Amino acid sequence: MSKTRSPCGPTAEGGVELKFKATEPIVRRLLAGFALVGAGCGGPVEPPLSAMCGDAPLTVAFYALFAPVSYSADENPNSPGFSRHMGYEADLLSALEAMPGTGLSFVRRPIADWPGIWLLPATPDFDMAGGGITILESRTLDDTGVRAVAFTSGHITFRQSLLVRSEDAARLSSYDALTSAVRVGVLAGTTGEARLLQITGIVDGSGVLRAGTRVETPAGTVVADGTGAFTITAAMASPVLGGRTRLHPPSSDMPRVVYLGRESGDQELFDALRDGRIDAVAQGEIGSGEAAHRSGGEFTVAARDSLAEFGGFTLDADARDLLTCIDARIDWLTDERRTGFAEWLADPSVFRQRAALWPGGG
């Protein structure tokens, strides 16, 4: 797998293709409207809109367990369907491939382990990662605090929510109703977890657990002392909190948190909600809405976060020109964020239709 790409594309006169590493500063302003001069190519390069993003497939890590945004056709890792990418992001990637003159193609590899998936493009095995990843500055940094990846343009809007059994909708109609008598299920390392802890006051603005919070882990129960040694954010958690299974709040006006789905994704959370082991699931509104729909009225979305965030793909931090090239095409496909999940849900061909209208195909 090569990290070398061709962001420049064919020349306007000679039909010669310039090839550069993605880290070279060739395409700084893809939509600026001026032509680049091609050294040794006999003439100017075509305007940036016609530039190809690359000439080799990009290997994409996609999260396999987040329907309907990004998921595998079959959740069984031993099934051939596990490698078949489905959902909103799958169709968006296919539309990127279909855009005339873009030169993008993707080799998609399913990933069932969520935490840290956004950092995979910084490894030799992947060029890009997706799966409903909320764009956060903290997620661009590796464990040493060095910038490892960069996000593309946001292509989907996320808002957190509470999914509950329909009979509990009135009782759990807001986050204010979450007391220590309520058990909320989360997937560790998600914005669902992070926002729940922030909204309910279990962590402060920096993600530091309130003093007295007890957390059950495989190594035993630890008690937060109010310092940064006990921190949970959407990008990281203190090592002492690794593998956490239960969180007991320091105050009766905060909920208990149950960690599920590390290996099987949201379905384990939904099963626990159905059989009464938890009272609510804290996750994105899109996933909650899908689960409520599939439940046939058994579940409902009872509360919605006021904060809206964007989701995007990640690339290696050094692939600046490739990122710029892909951003321009994502912005076209989403009509500068005016076309998103709701439009795709109403018509799954919406991105393909936009791709066919791309003006950069020559």
Image (cartoon, rainbow, N blue to C red):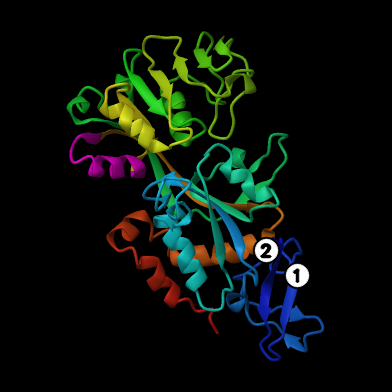
* First along the sequence among labels 2 and 1: 1
Q: Position of residue 147 (x, y in %)?
A: 70, 44
- At x 20%, y 34%, the residue is 298
Depicted 191 relative to depicted 71: above or below: above
Q: Nearer the viewer, residue 109 or 286?
A: 109
As measured in the structure, the alpha-carbon distance from the residue carrying label 2 to the one carrying label 1 is 10 Å
Of the numbered discs in the image, which one, if any, rests on residue 20? 1
State the residue in front, 307 or 215.
215
Classed neighbour count for the residue bearing mark 1: other residues with Cα under 10 Å, few (<14), some (14–19), many (≥20): some
Q: Amino acid at mark 1?
A: Phe
Query: Which segment did they paint magenta?
Result: 286-300
Q: Quadrant of the C terminus?
A: bottom right
Side of 211 relative to 287 (left or right): right
- Type of secondary structure dominating the magenta stretch: helix
Instruction: Measuring from the top left, give residue 113's x and y in whole percent.
Output: 53, 39
Q: Residue at x 46, y 17 (%)?
A: 247
Residue shown at the point (74%, 60%) measured from the top left: 23
Under circle 2, the secondary element is: helix
Disc 1 on helix, strand or loop? strand
Quadrant of image for the N terminus: bottom right
Q: Position of residue 70 (x, y in %)?
A: 43, 51
Query: Which amino acid lies under the numbered mark 2 shown in the image of this protein?
Result: Asp
Residue 297: in magenta span: yes
Quarter location, residue 51: bottom right
Query: Is residue 306 among the parts visible in the rendering?
Result: no
Q: Is residue 47 visible?
A: yes
- Quick check: marks 2 and 1 in contact, CB under 8 Å? yes
Q: Front-most of 58 and 157?
A: 58
Of the numbered discs in the image, which one, if any, rests on residue 321? 2
Give how far across and how far down residue 8 sits, in percent. Answer: 68, 74
Query: What residue do we see at 24% from left, 44% from top?
Result: 293
Q: Which mark is residue 257?
A: none
